Amino acid sequence: MATPAEQVQDPVGGVGCSRKRKEDARFIQGKGNYTDDLKLPGQVFGAFVRSPIAHGRVVSINKEPALAHPGVFAVLTAEDLKPLNLHWMPTLAGDTQMVLADGKVCFQQQEVAFVIAEDRYVAADAVELVEVEYEELPVITDARQAMSADAPVIREDLEGKTEGAHGERVHHNHIFRWDVGDAAATDKVFASAPLTVSEDISYQRVHPCPLETCGCVSDFDKIKGELTVYLTSQAPHVVRTVVSMLSGIPESKVHVIAPDIGGGFGNKVGVYPGYVCAIVGSIVLGRPVKWIETRVENLAATAFARDYHMRGELAADEEGRVQALRVHVLADHGAFDACADPSKFPAGLFSIVTGSYDIPTAFARVDGVYSNKAPGGVAYRCSFRVTEASYLIERMMDVLAQKLGIDPAEIRSRNFIRAEQFPYTSCLGWEYDSGDYHTAMQQALEAVDYEGLRKEQAEKRAKGDLMGIGVAFFTEIVGAGPTKNCDILGIGMVDSCEIRVHPTGSAIARLGTKSQGQGHETTYAQIIATELGIPSDDIQIEEGDTATAPYGLGTYGSRSTPVGGAAAARAARKVKDKARKIAAAMMEVSPADLEWDVDRFVVKSLPDQSRTIKEIALAAYQHLPEGLEQGLEAVEYYDPPNFTYPFGAYICVVDIDRFTGEVKIRRFYALDDCGTRINPMIIEGQVHGGLTESLGIALGQELAFDEDGNILSASFMDYFMPTAVETPHWETDFTVTPSPHHPIGAKGVGESPNVGGVSAISNAVIDAFAHQGVTHMQMPHTAYAVWKQINALGLNK
Amino acid sequence: MAKKLISMTVNGQAHDVAVEPRELLIHTLRERLSLTGSHIGCETSHCGACTVDFNGESVKSCTMLAVQADGAEILTVEGLASDGTLHPVQEGFVEKHGLQCGFCTPGMMVRAYRLLQENPNPSEEEIRVGLSGNLCRCTGYQNIVRAVQYAADKMSAE
């Protein structure tokens, strides 16, 4: 059942309305303001010389021919950055990363030198003129080989160090070991369980790949000593702090401005060598330096995601009730550990791996390793490894169902956390805030006529046709996060909102988050409109300028609504508290005598006595009785008491051509429960987009490498991007289970479809072969990979 | 590098521009004419963010030399609206939530504009095929299809 956006009649255009987007006007007229659109007076252009090999020593760098080229201003190498102590930089994960190759290169396309020239053409010419001599070293691209005894040492700077940022290192290519749960108790359950299943499940290396690549323009004002950096950042305030720490410039003199961003999906959280080099360049030259990634650089060098090699095991009884879960993960982090996770979580929130199920005992171990691949490990439309965790448990539930001959939907229902168990504390320690999984699953099964589909599948199988039905149920953990658990570089993961109501009744709100297409200018205004009774059209939303917005940790991990949205609601409530006092003074009654009605305070006993927010706003800037200060504004820093736990039931139906292996998604139904729905139109748009990304991952994408460490998928020639043709019509649906601790009950939705979509599509493809005894196939399920499975089974004869 | 003078009409306005022989049209539009609506997303003519209308055809301006545009008639996103009135394609993208981050949108709309000239009443399938040279990472295309259908309906009613 496709659900049209609800048409809510609301005088102020508040929560629940499918309000048209405020940001669209500039984008449809070519008036967006993206980083590469900036042209500052005197601006010059930087470009990287990159390593052609995956591992080797840098024997020599000769920059003279490049420097002699007309229009070239500078060529920076690690030697130039060393006196500033900027040749290496700290990563968000507690490791360090070379800004420019310091004696060796550890992955192909690593940054070796930074050329600054009058424009991008001259810079490209000069990149070719820098002569670099390398001496090749053996290469590791397979995480499973990284910790073998004779594996080459990738990080010589760490040689002999047995302690890393997250505890003991057991091998020279080992980064961390992270254990969660009760290992002994889990082993005990497995030893005596009636039934166990296990499967090796990899989630391949992929890339968020926003359509706009990363970039910046750095502008240093020598006279004021102020640095302004325009930068494609999902977290501009954090970048400001990092830049201040690295450069020594006081944070008050560093301005980071994130202009319009052409998609982020996790790619634009980190700090990249290009930013550091552009900043240094602008300080050295006294001119603005622009650096814009090419697509090849984007795919090859910044911010991969996933690359998790997992072994999942379930212990269960004969009815399919899970008694224990055991997981071991080998996590390939590339040459530098630059994962973007809350600092104390080297494997992110992977411990949500028990999923939507009431599993009494579990243990998970994650070993992070270095390899000769690019650093990254970002949360690609995902709340810190939730996607990997969800994929693991959703695959394992199918494996168990298959072993027992129980339907995949049924085995999930038997194990779901029941509605009356919420708030539910999982055996790995998370407190799920709210949920009603059985209702959602039932609604999904009825919507697609699940029984009818299984009947059709049986008939198709009898004829030799390949039809798969994928069932996936996910629970996310988003909205990082409570400062008691979550920080980045020691800064608690709060977010913020400042609201100012002007004398004539319109308002401006500034937030610490940063939209990359999610529609914050529209939805935050709706939250404030409902709280304050100011029409959403009269509320201006601003983000991304650290000089004006209050400090916040930014937009990723579906945290804008759970944290920023909560801050907006609570800031509005502070404004409203003051408005109540002013209204009471205006009508000469006690504040307690007033009640709120849409856009005004009304005297309880005298309903014709009222003051609208517009009237109160004007009064706030006039003479007020003693004890009341002028102005109508408030700021809120919100530290959420808990994460939120959105969930959903997804069902995917695929038909597979048994001669070509081509997978066609015939039908995809997505039911999402993100709590209170702020703007249904935007929610559905988010779901469509996330599902399309999940299609790309499940059916085609992989950052692949050959044995020499050459990246094989560094352009859209080789890296699958779904077009409108491969993309099916998405059916969306919902239930509403508000979050009990969020001020308006909202949970966040942006990442759910990527999390649930991959599992549903992959489960559908594998389900098409379930009757042949196939329990798992590795993603991506490309036509060739699927054809190989068909051919091995002889189904194309 | 010695520059070459070219003449072209962009959004109805005549321009004489001195360009490098190797200069890509997208850079001429964005950097010399300050028409930054068209974007660069991939450099391999896959993504279509740089799509402009070139002598009545959709062209990816990141893989065309500016000197090839000598004498050409070009329409970019900045020229879609006329006399302060949005083109039905632009209206459709707003009404049907056909954009999110907005980066693909100019190229997508300029392509949709040409598609509707070629086929004023396309089926969903024809719209999907017609836009398959333009990538969007945000919308999943569903609302873009609706936006184009909206524009087709509006244009045929006019």
Image: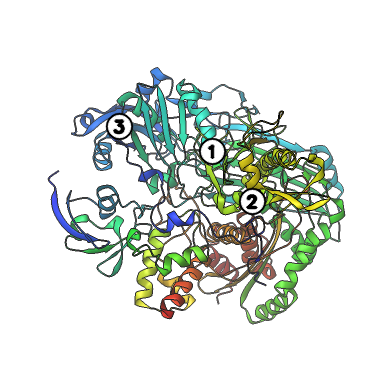
Asked where in the image residue A68 lies, by quadrant, the reply is top left
Q: Secondary structure at mark 1?
A: loop
Q: Nearer the viewer, residue A412 or B54?
A: B54
Give the CA distance from mark 2 to mark 1. 26 Å
Q: Give the percent coordinates (x, y) of residue B100.
A: 51, 56
In the image, is residue A339 above or below residue A659?
A: above
Disc 1 to disc 3, how far (Cα)? 35 Å
Across and down, in percent, residue A155 comes to: 50, 28
Q: On the rendered structure, is A76 left or right of A228?
A: left
Q: Which residue is mark 3?
A: A132
Nearer to us of marks 2 and 3 is: 2
Q: How many marks can you see?
A: 3
Q: State whether residue A309 appears in this view.
A: yes
Residue at image location 13% in from the left, 53% down from the top: B5
Q: Tell me the chain of label 1.
A: A
The image quarter in which residue A348 lies: top right
Tell me where residue A473 sits by quadrant.
bottom right
Between the residue at mark 2 and the residue at mark 3, the CA separation in whole angstroms equals: 59 Å
Q: Which mark is residue A529?
A: 2
Q: Please, what secondary structure does the residue beneath circle 3 have? A: strand
Q: Callout 2, which amino acid? A: Ala
Q: Name the residue: 86% across, 51% down.
A: A421
Q: Amino acid at mark 1?
A: Ala
| Residue tagged 1 | A235
Q: Earlier in the sequence, mark 2 or mark 1?
A: 1
Q: Amino acid at mark 3?
A: Val
Q: Secondary structure at mark 2?
A: helix
Q: Earlier in the sequence, mark 1 or mark 3?
A: 3
Question: Looking at the rendered structure, which numbered label has been put on residue A174?
Answer: none
User: A642 or B78, which lies in front?
Assistant: B78
